[in-house]
Amino acid sequence: MNNKPDSSSLVYTEQIDSQYSQQLYLLFALIIVVGLILRLWGLGNVGLHGDEETTAMPALEILNSGLPLMPSGMLYPRAPVQSYLIALSALVFGPSEWALRFPSVIAGNLGIVFAFFLGKRFLSPKWNLLFVLIIALNPWMITVSQTARMYIFFSTSLILFAVLVFRWEENGSWRRLLAAFIAFLIAQQFHTLAIFSTFLFFFPYLIHPSPKRVAQGLIAFILAFVIFQYQRSFVAAQYGSTLAHSLFDSPEKLSPLEFLLSYHLIGTALILLVCLFTLGAAVYFQKHRTWNFLIGIGFLTVAVGAAFFLQYHIAFLFYCSGIILFVRSSARKVLLCVLTLLLLALFLFQFYLIYDSSLYPSTIEIVKAFVGRLSVYPYLAFFGKFPIALILYAFPFLYAIQRIATGSPVPDHFLFFIISVVLPLVLAGFFRWYFSPRFSFQLTPFFVLSCLAGIFYLEKALKRTFGSKRLQYAFVVTCFLVLGFIKPLELSGSVNPNCEKFPDHKGAASFMHTVHLNPNDLILAEDVLQQVYYLGKVDYWLRAFVDAKSFVKEKDGILVDIYTHTPLIGTGDDLEKILTDKNRGFLYIITMGKTDDSKSYYLGNGILDVLNLYDPEVIYIGCDKKTMVLRLPPNSLLHDAN
């Protein structure tokens, strides 16, 4: 491993101390024990929440039929390994919330163990123990480890995948590559988002270029993509066709790009041509056309083209990359300044035309349109979880960019950050604009590792600069890391959870078990899966069609939930028909939450208006102060009261 690499290289591998004392191993063991205790503490305190019941129902069906089937008979295709592990846990401990979540606890604690071996690649022993401690105490890691869903299994298997990639990197052995590929397949069956981590197969080649390594990486990458496509088709086949094409979708309207090309093509094209002329001038006047310069010009050209087509997210990424390589090539900076001003003029010109056209009613929608097809929301969803840590990591990351731009290489953990964190978030933006944080949870260990490795690198740089007189900032940095990743206040709210933190589905179901129902009484539930799990069945799923359309299909002429075949009441008119039915008895509605005005989140499409008109009686409020059971009397009594 080189500590003083060739200056033409962008990255190099640092020599890391791998000697761990007995005391450090004992501390590692203590961290594992503490992590296990925190994950087990209060594991069965609360009822199922989120999508836990979606995992629980097929897992428990395995004990009956041997297959992970939903109540509708649908084969549940996601995370089959987890389903069978939960079934085993329920067989041993009984079908309790504790048993359903216990496999997640084991997976979470294995993640702590694997994190130790992951951190050894970039961190010295003490920094690595800090990394492991953060993984053990991070509130997000604890909460997900106490949840009967696949995300902690996904995270842990990706950590193992990265560890085995690093082992394969050591000698390029086909056997080690096979082990890493198997770890990837395990991660892939837990969640299809593992496909975004396949670029780690190219990490060894980028560090140690060779024909063998690029061939190995390509083979693994292609096979992974083929398996991903097969898995995606298999999952889609189990779900079948749903009514995702809604009648309530707004009609197509003229896009900003279509507006500019139709009415302002000459002005925007003129600025585009001037930008391209500036890039051509840069090539013409540059005497030494090195690869850094040519690739930088290529990146800047893509940035100009993306800006012209209102894809400013892509333009920004290529522009920043182009700047780094352009500056590194020692080209004339004046041309880069001119290009930057022209790109700014292009943006302001386009923004003014769109804003002045009244094509979009709000500035936010205009900004979103200018971001382009590639969403920035994955960044916001993920890094929003760690704002302090992100600010802290900005210092070593910007320092590394400055060194690359001035011709100096940087440690390879910055490349690891790009491949393992940034690239998956960028790719995720191609597929979905609004991105739930849970879909990026698996990147947490990689970001924590990158952050610590960056600070570790900056510490050594400061030590070389200041020598013995350097600032004693280690304690301050450690405090910021604790605030950024462990978050003591959030940690205290994650361990030993209580029902105030989660919807009280179980409490509402327990209350309904005490109600003496008549044959004509009806139960409607907002969260149909939760209540089918606890009650066995409900009569109707009460959810606005615009929210439910992706999970319903037509069966015998009515719309039903694909998981339970519960009929949907998706509009106010549908609810009105039920309420005015002369033959119905009491009608019970189990809600799942409320907004500031104490009304439900998902009762749109006129449903909430009908409920307000009939003013149902609240007969139960859950311990979360949000979940409620509402009751309406039979139709005859309802008319008598009015």
Image (tube, rainbow, N blue to C red):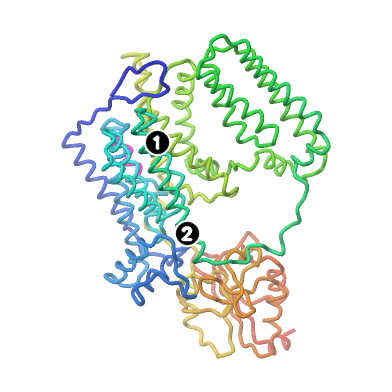
Quarter of the image with the N terminus is top left
Classed neighbour count for the residue bearing mark 1: other residues with Cα under 10 Å, few (<14), some (14–19), many (≥20): many
**Furthest-left residue in this view:** 22
Element carrying mark 1: helix
* Residue 592, above or below 291: below
Quarter where residue 519 is shown: bottom right
Give percent across and percent down for residue 145: 37, 55
- Provide residue 632's location: percent of width, then percent of height: 64, 81
Sequence-wise first label, 2 or 1: 1
Q: What's the residue type where badge 2 is placed?
A: Lys
Name the mark nearer the viewer: 2 or 1. 1
Image check: 626 left or right of 493? right
Q: Nearer the viewer, residue 447 or 203?
A: 203
| In the image, residue 279 above or below residue 265 | above
Position of residue 334 in the picture relative to residue 33 (left or right)? right
On whether residue 57 falls in the magenta region, the answer is: no
Q: Is residue 333 left or right of residue 292?
A: right
Q: CA distance from mark 2 to mark 1?
A: 42 Å
The C terminus sits in image quarter:
bottom right
Residue tagged 1: 202
Q: Is residue 484 left or right of residue 28?
A: right
Q: Specify the segment rendered in magenta.
A: 128-135
The answer to whether residue 600 is seen in the rendering is no
Q: Main secondary structure of the magenta part?
A: helix
The reply to whether the magenta stretch includes residue 134 is yes
| Res 278 label | none
- Asked if residue 547 can be seen in this view, the reply is yes
> 421 or 625, which lies in front?
421
Residue 27 in percent (x, y) is at: 22, 41
Q: Label 2: which residue? A: 501
